[in-house]
Image (cartoon, rainbow, N blue to C red):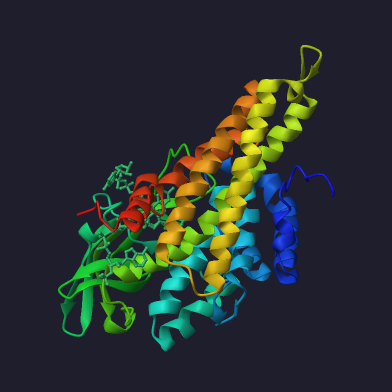
Amino acid sequence: PPAPDPQDFLGLDRELDTDEVTVRDTVRAFARSTLYPHIAEWFDAGTIPEPRTLAKSFGELGLLGMHLEGYGCAGTSAVSYGVACRELEAVDSGIRSFVSVQGSLAMAALYKYGSEEQRQTWLPGMATGDVIGCFGLTEPDAGSDPGSMRTRARRQGSDWIIDGTKMWITNGTVADVAVVWAQTDEGVRGFVVPTDTPGFQANVIRQKLSLRASITAELVLDGVRLPDSARLPEVAGLGAALSCLNEARYGIVWGAAGAARACYAAALDYTGTRVQFGRPIAGFQLTQRRLADMVVDVTHADMTALRIGRLKDAGQCHHNHVSFGKFANVAAAQRVASAARGLHGANGITLEYPVMRHMVNLETVATYEGTEEIHALSVGQAVTGLSSFR
Ligand code: TGC
Ligand code: FAD
């Protein structure tokens, strides 16, 4: 039998079907030619300089709302979407986040819970990248516990008046439309807020040390008046918001595997050429132990992502499967990124190499979409039947 491929030790890519391989190769080629050459510069600048151009190129590739059906969306399998997320996050977590927030949060909320009119109004433009969306759930005082949100929507005649502040909202300052979650007298509801509505303001959050190639914002809603047609009619409680999170978390399961693979590949390359004590540092036993740990983590992450993807395509993916995947794969990626950074020595702290950029990005990935603790507790609840939350 052939020896293992160091980049795919257990030959997992042979499990992908033709369509999935095509997605992998197309997104990989785009990522390498169009994104990778600029990513260190964007990270250094602490922003994505031309988000609209980027959104349109994602739209042209069919990446936005990729696994949704109709409305100009590509309608691929969940595994194909996951494979795309893996390629994007191999470049940078901020890039995958851009696609996740647009397709798996903002578009997914409209797709699952919107009226036909809302879907027709927003989704085609969002699929092409002409319209940018964001998703406002987190608040300054409500992160892991979104049920304690203070943003409030009150009825006034046939309209709604929304007041509150959302925090840490990806693409908040460049979005044309925000999906905003608010408490009402009937429970949590979702609203589709055009960002040029009077009373809506977005302020960029600066000085981030992680996910710097991504735009993050505070949203302030001060007496924002909207007709009832802006309410997502199918939402009946917090569970709707959480079900959108499952879609984005699923992309992270794959994306984290991509960040891990990129760090492992960089470490393999660097240690093979860096010479100390007269030989490549890859020849030292301690280096090989680290590389062996890394290839196990990368391969486990890929296996977890593929299994969860297949469950999702079969309609068998419970939200606790996704929690398992986010918990396992982000931690694996953090271990790999940290080890890769160490193996690069002083070079590892620069943007000339991708490892520390991934390492610090993964701090965000471990926090957003449910922290490591929240997903550990979701898995804990699934295996014990006991909720630790309340
Ligand atoms: P709890 O009482 O457990 O649940 C309320 C209702 O929701 C149901 N449910 C879910 N449904 C679908 N998917 C899930 N993942 C669900 N989790 C719970 C649940 O069955 C219940 O339904 P029902 O019919 O019985 O009412 O809710 P809780 O308030 O106790 O909270 C549970 C907890 C802690 C797991 C949840 O609040 C949570 O996930 N917290 C983390 C918050 C979070 O992840 N925020 C992310 C914000 S968006 C973001 O970070 C974007 S980053 C950019 C990017 O994605 O790239
Ligand atoms: P907290 O909830 O205050 O948690 C602080 C610490 O307490 C964590 O370690 C946490 O695990 C721990 N903790 C909390 N509860 C428990 C418990 N029950 N048991 C044990 N430990 C616990 N949100 C959006 O809505 N939309 C976005 O687009 C978005 N984008 C983001 C982009 C970035 C760059 C970042 C950093 C965040 C983004 N978020 C977004 C917000 C993100 O979802 C929240 O930061 C996350 O849910 C955690 O909330 P918090 O930061 O308030 O931390």
Nearer the observer, 162 or 65? 65
Instruction: Choose top left, top right, bottom left or bottom right for residue 336.
Output: top right
Nearer the observer, 217 or 136? 136
**At 29% across and 58% down in the image, what residue appears?**
385
Instruction: Choose top left, top right, bottom left or bottom right for residue 23.
Output: bottom right
Image position of 83 with respect to 209: above or below:
below
Residue 321 visible (yes or no): yes
Residue 195 visible (yes or no): no
Q: Residue furthest top?
A: 277
Query: Residue 167 location, x and y as percent?
Result: 33, 52
Labels in figure, total: 0
Instruction: Choose top left, top right, bottom left or bottom right for residue 195.
Output: bottom left
**Quarter occupied by the C terminus:** bottom left
Image position of 350 with respect to 240: above or below:
above
Query: Residue 322 location, x and y as percent?
Result: 46, 59
Nearer the observer, 324 or 218? 324
Query: Residue 314 location, x and y as percent?
Result: 55, 74
Q: Residue furthest front?
A: 1
- Residue 298 shown left or right of residue 248 in the figure: right
**At 72% across and 69% down in the image, what residue appears?**
17
**At 22% across and 81% down in the image, what residue appears?**
159
Q: Residue furthest right?
A: 2
Query: Residue 227 location, x and y as percent?
Result: 28, 81
**At 25% across and 56% down in the image, what residue appears?**
386
- Residue 187 shown left or right of residue 109 in the figure: left
